[in-house]
Image (tube, rainbow, N blue to C red):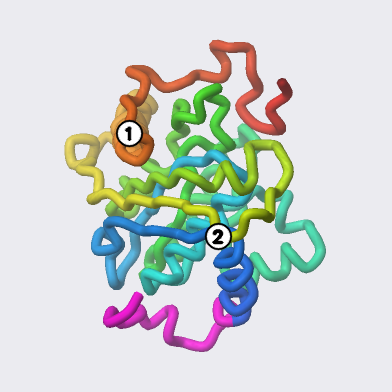
Amino acid sequence: MSGVPASPEKRRPSVYWLLGGLVVPAISLLAKIEIEGKENVPRSGAFVLTPNHVSELDPLIVAVAVWRIGRAPTFFAKESLFRVPVLGAAMRAAKMIPVSRSASSSAARETIRQAEIVAANGRGIIVYPEGSLTRDPEMWPMRGKTGAVRLALAGDLPVIPVAHWGVQEIFPRYGKLRVFPLRRRVRMVIGEPVDLAEFRGAQTEPAVLSRATSVVMDRIADLVSRLRGIPAPAQRWNPSAHGQNETGRLEP
């Protein structure tokens, strides 16, 4: 981003320089990313960035956008990815945070503990609040999980909602990569921080976390609506109500 200084985390030599040198040119061939609302990403300090999830490729799109804005992207990522040769090593070097999909409360506590360490070091954390690619047939954000707001409330961190649209034309949900035409348009809008003040002080209560998550998901849906130019559904898609698994590949 021309004229805007990068954060210290991006200026310091790190594995991000190597990953950026590989990933940014590749993604730039596939997508022309247009970003609105760059000023809503803090220039320093910790934050939680919450994007919608429509494609297996969109984490890289979001990562490149965050890098261009001047911050080094850190993700929550499925624990199983850390066991993949080369990829796992790169993710650990980039300080990505493994997320267990176990129902164990101890696993959840460990994830939050690691995230709080990263946040204490002033890093931004990218968390997909849906927890998986949307199951909504029309590709709207579906019902969210509470991990993002749990982290934000525990660490008193701003939640920055993000919406993007267009990446699904490059890599359809559970489909195959479409290389051509090159540089398809991908639009992204970054919203202002979500005000979660009313939920602070009761962030360990499941009902409070659920309501706070709904507020965040509504903001993300509003941003997606803005990009698509059509109203978002009044209610979020609930996979369990439609006989769908919450995680894993969506079968037709």
Q: Residue at x 61, y 51 (%)?
A: 57
Q: Residue at x 35, y 78 (%)?
A: 7
Above or below: residue 203 compared with residue 74: above
Mark 2 or mark 1: which comes first in sequence? 2
Amino acid on which disc 2 is placed: Arg
Q: Residue furthest right?
A: 85
Q: Which residue is mark 2?
A: 183
Q: Residues within 10 Å of mark 2 (few under 14, many from 20)?
A: some
Q: Which residue is mark 1?
A: 229
Above or below: residue 68 compared with residue 180: below
What segment is highlighted magenta in the picture?
A: 1-17
Q: Secondary structure at mark 1?
A: loop
User: In what quadrant of the picture does the C terminus appear?
Assistant: top right
Amino acid on which disc 1 is placed: Gly
In the shown orientation, is residue 93 left or right of residue 110? right
Above or below: residue 196 compared with residue 137: below
Q: Secondary structure at mark 2?
A: loop
In this rendering, does residue 115 appear at all?
Answer: yes
